[in-house]
Amino acid sequence: MLTALDKRLLKEVADLHRDPPGAYNIRKDGQGIDRHSLPGIEVKPKTGEPGIEVIVEPGKEGTVHIPVLLTESDQSDLVYNTIDIGAEADILLVAGCGIHNPGGGTAQHDGLHTITVRKGARLRYVEKHFGEGEGKGERILNPKTEIIVEEGAYVELELVQIRGVDHTVRSTVAQVKPTGQLVMFERMLTDGEQSAESDIEVKLYGDECVARAVSRSVAQDKSRQIFRPRLIAYGRGRGRVECDSIIMGEASIRSIPEIAAEHAEAELAHEAAIGKIAGEQLMKLMALGLTSEEAEEKIISGFLS
């Protein structure tokens, strides 16, 4: 049975206010505690290693929730999830991890999601990370996603980390086949002495494939961020990388975008910007009655939305 804490974490990482609609798997403190499949959408435990398989039959529509919760200190959880989205299917997949660390030990979750989106299918994948807890122990998340976008498929990735995670190294590797499309939105906020690294590699194969990777981040206090997005075209594909960051206090941000063309007709572009909150924005909001802290929060919230 889910506790009040479990439900609050599920609301943060999966926007769940009640039992999950559709198919789902809920993992808590290293164990699967609830699971539900639907006709044509099967969710089952893997054999020989921790994690699950999600198998969606061709043409199916629906939602799948696969959140992870850590509510105890001194634990390290590792999962290997395999997800297969059948041809012409249309799926919303909500993942993510919420950590509540009540003690002095480390609470850590590492996960590898291997995703195949078959010909003509559509997938919207949402992964949110959140950390809290009254203890002094660290909250660590290291997600890795490997995704194949087959011919004519469309994939949208929304990767979000807002507060509470002390250290994270995120790796996203994608292959986009001819006429496939990949759109990736990454949003991140760090504060205190937190650190975050994000490595993205997108490979465009064949003609008429498209990829766009957009990263927006805010670094506060003494936190550190590093972004390394890489876009490679092996055919007549099109792609763009955008990194936009707000830096505050004594934080540091490194943004290292790379584009590489292995075909004469590839079209690739990138841009990166790091800057502080504009003074005129603060003054305008403060003139409307907000304090300086409230004005900063308003600007940050709008920037990351």
Image (cartoon, grey):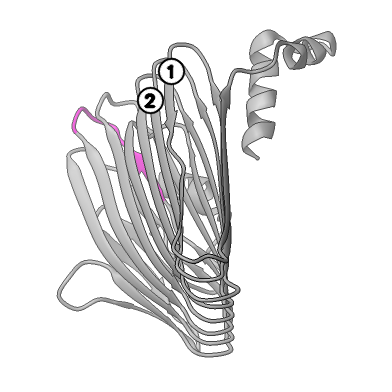
Crowd class of label 2 (few under 14; some 14 to 19; many from 20; radius 10 Å) = many
**Residue 43 is inside the magenta segment:** no
In the image, residue 288 sits, relative to residue 28, either above or below, namely: above
In the image, residue 130 sits, relative to residue 89, either above or below, namely: above
Q: Residue furthest right?
A: 288
Residue 119, label in figure = none
The kind of secondary structure element at disc 2 is: strand
Is residue 122 or residue 31 the one in the foreground? 122
In the image, residue 292 sits, relative to residue 200, either above or below, namely: above
Is residue 105 or residue 165 the one in the foreground? 165
Left or right, 12 with reference to 73:
right
Please state the horizontal and vertical placement of residue 187, each as a whole percent of the image.
Answer: 54, 41
Identify the residue shown where x is 69% and y is 16%.
278
Label 1 sits on residue: 251
In terms of image quadrants, where is residue 74?
A: top left
Please state the horizontal and vertical placement of residue 116, each as a whole percent of the image.
Answer: 42, 76
Is residue 119 or residue 99 the one in the foreground? 119
On-image quarter of the C terminus? top right
Total labels: the figure holds: 2
Contact, CB < 8 Å: mark 1 with mark 2?
Answer: yes
The kind of secondary structure element at disc 1 is: loop
Identify the residue shown where x is 59% and y is 77%.
179
Please state the horizontal and vertical placement of residue 99, each as a whole percent of the image.
Answer: 35, 42
Q: Residue furthest left?
A: 48
Which residues fall within the magenta stretch? 97-105
Label 2 sits on residue: 224
Q: Earlier in the sequence, mark 1 or mark 2?
A: 2
Q: Tell me the amino acid under the disc marked 1.
A: Ala
